[in-house]
Amino acid sequence: MTSSCSLRKQGVPEERQYKSKNIEIVIARYNEDLNWLENPIFYPIDNITVYNKGQNDNFMKNIRRTIDLPNLGRESHTYLTHIIRNYDSLADMTIFLPGSAETPHKWSKVQTIMEMLKETEEHAFPEINADIYGEELDFHLDAWGCNHTMNQEMHPSTELTPSKYRPFREWYAHYFGMHTYGTYTKCGYTGVFAINKKHILKRPKSYYMNLIQDLEVSSNPEVGHYFERAWSAVFDII
């Protein structure tokens, strides 16, 4: 079998593309085929872990690690699970991606962070939203459906489990304090970003174990959308 790394190598210069030497790609998968991993943009990264929350394993098999998880908390739960389980053995840089990364509005963000990683060993967020703690403080959602067609087939429901702290300002204030209002503006909308382990390790493991509890309530929690707006606060990145 041809490895995904060999496929991605085609047409890519031999020299290492990215600043960090030790990179891991972590994927939150539900029902996607993940063939987008064959794209040369990821070469020479071959340290890939897929957390599978779907009812099948109909996806690319030439992946180093596949770990089954219960279908809870969308991609935010997956990312925190990876951090908690690997707190003492994290890669220098972790790229967090949803299984639906190939959809156009997400793929453009994947391309952005991969370009950023050629220049930095710190972190890569595709968006900076200076207004996030202004106009979005009252953000809340009552319903949200999967936008990937493969996922819609298995999970057509749009029902959200409301956050126990809502709207966003109440959740943010509970975990990060309103004294940090306006400090953090980098966002991980659609669950696409990369982070150096030194930023993750600023917080103790117990901190992430506390955060993940809000995501363990259902397969579609409202708080998952809050995390998209607060990843830089989670990792204390200004």
Image (cartoon, grey):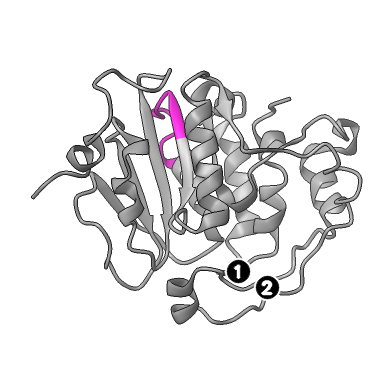
- Quarter-wise, where is residue 205 in the image? top right
Q: Nearer the viewer, residue 179 or 88?
A: 179
Q: Amino acid at mark 1?
A: Asn
Residue 174 is marked as: none
Indicate the amino acid at tag 2: Leu
Identify the residue at image location x=35%, y=23%.
Answer: 22
The magenta segment: 83-94
**Residue bearing the label numbered 1:** 220
* Magenta highlight on residue 84: yes
| Residue on which disc 2 sits | 160
Residue 230 appears in view: yes
Farthest residue, direction front = 11
Q: Secondary structure at mark 2?
A: loop
Residue 80 visible (yes or no):
no
**Is 45 on the left or on the right of 198, as rendered?**
left
Q: Position of residue 167 (x, y in %)?
A: 85, 59
